[in-house]
Image (cartoon, coloured by chain):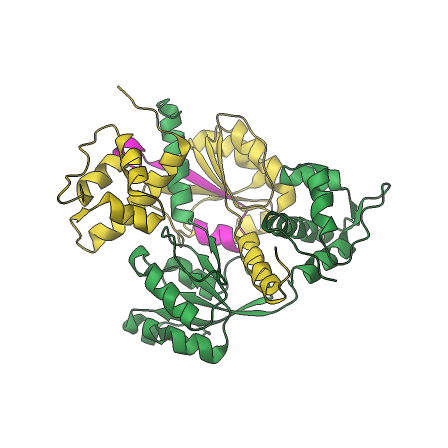
Chain colours: A green, B yellow
Amino acid sequence: MIKKIPLPAVSRLSAIYRLLCDLSAQGVEFVSSAALGEMLGVGAHNIRKDVSYLLETDGASAKNGYDVERLKGQISRALGFDTEFKACVVGLGKLGLAILRNELFFNDKMRVVAGFDSNINLVETIKVDIDVYPSFDITETVKRLDVKLAILTVPQQFAQECANRLVQGGIKGIVNFTSVVIKTEPFVKVRNVDLTSELRILSALVSLDENSNLT
Amino acid sequence: MIKKIPLPAVSRLSAIYRLLCDLSAQGVEFVSSAALGEMLGVGAHNIRKDVSYLLETDGASAKNGYDVERLKGQISRALGFDTEFKACVVGLGKLGLAILRNELFFNDKMRVVAGFDSNINLVETIKVDIDVYPSFDITETVKRLDVKLAILTVPQQFAQECANRLVQGGIKGIVNFTSVVIKTEPFVKVRNVDLTSELRILSALVSLDENSNLT
């Protein structure tokens, strides 16, 4: 029987998984829900509740806490981290290129198989191991290569149009690096990450704070 | 007289600023609060409210909407985007290096002046134009160079320790790229950005959805 997992739990379990990877790299064998909660800034009971959503779960032994390797495997299986996804990068600016060149934050289960840019000259001259295509080929190419995830790093004004083409091509999930809130079908999952704004917000908070200009 | 600006408004104004930069690049001269709201997925009234927090504001003329260049300048001055900040990157993995090499999402007002890593060999052999130092020099170096912002891209288990050293050195703002919730002084602003987890969450949402395994 398959348990339903609410979004906040999915999100926390992903963070827990990342912590477990680090712990296992350090050779740590057991970790308590309290220790995990401490690292994630939530209560131990949240951690235990999240873990209880896993398909197979034997909980933590009061004495040793969770078996790091076993819990890692359980989360990975429950959230489908073992499933390999084909991804594409739309918009080959600095960020897009860094992602395309796999220089950033990829888990080995996410394979970038295509890049897209509206600049034909760039598409023709760019030096990367991954095939790049002009943006007007998005729908057809995504369909043909059976790409399920897309990373959107285009200028704001092209965000919605590119998202539409991606969805028409069968994309199921989009990481949106633009400031634009893209509208799409309910079955398409979107995660918004706006790095530039994060940095701007931070500098704003700091300078406003120095001028005691922030509530 | 200085107006107080609540955090959500700071955050939206930063996004508005980014949109205005794109619009001005396209040669657009005027934009309505409705159009801005549409792009950001909020109501026109939110946009007008946010703009009303600006120190100098002449609002939008009902006919033309906001003057793109003028509003850009007003936001930039109000949020201190003109103030140049010295930043440092702590943890020189793929992401840290990409940021250090200024390959990512930097506005020209944020100048990266130092990099830190606990791996001495890396620090001695790395090829970058920016000075890099061993992590144990964080506090002293940040103080000496008067660095105010830090970008934290270290493994989870070093996040809190590095944050402490940064704060001791006088850091006012931290962009935290780790999954760890770092504890710090109230006067230090922290923005959390967890790229790896964002991508994991997305793939989880997609595969859970395919197994209709998500509430």
Residue at (53, 48) in percent of width and height:
B194
The answer to whether residue A23 shows anywhere in this view is: no
Check the image and name the residue furthest to the top.
B1
Residue at (43, 66) in percent of width and height:
A89
Residue B198 in the image, given as x and y percentages of width and height: 53, 53
Q: Quadrant of residue A157?
A: bottom left
Check the image and name the residue furthest to the bottom.
A144
Image height check: is B186 above or below B32? Answer: above
Residue B187 in the image, given as x and y percentages of width and height: 48, 25
Range shown magenta: B76-99
- Judging depth in this view, the residue of A156 and B213 nearest the camera is B213
In the image, is A57 to the left or to the right of B185? right
Residue at (28, 47) in percent of width and height:
B36
Check the image and name the residue furthest to the right.
A63
The answer to whether residue B149 shows anywhere in this view is: yes
In the image, is B31 to the left or to the right of B212? left
Q: Quadrant of the C terminus of chain B?
A: bottom right
The mark tally for this picture is: 0
Q: Is residue B78 magenta?
A: yes
Q: Quadrant of the N terminus of chain B?
A: top left
Residue B52 in the image, given as x and y percentages of width and height: 26, 31
- Judging depth in this view, the residue of B205 and A34 nearest the camera is B205
Residue at (39, 64) in percent of width and height:
A163
Residue B195 in the image, given as x and y percentages of width and height: 52, 52
Image height check: is A114 above or below A198? Answer: below
Q: Is residue A44 magenta?
A: no
In the image, is B211 to the left or to the right of A92? right
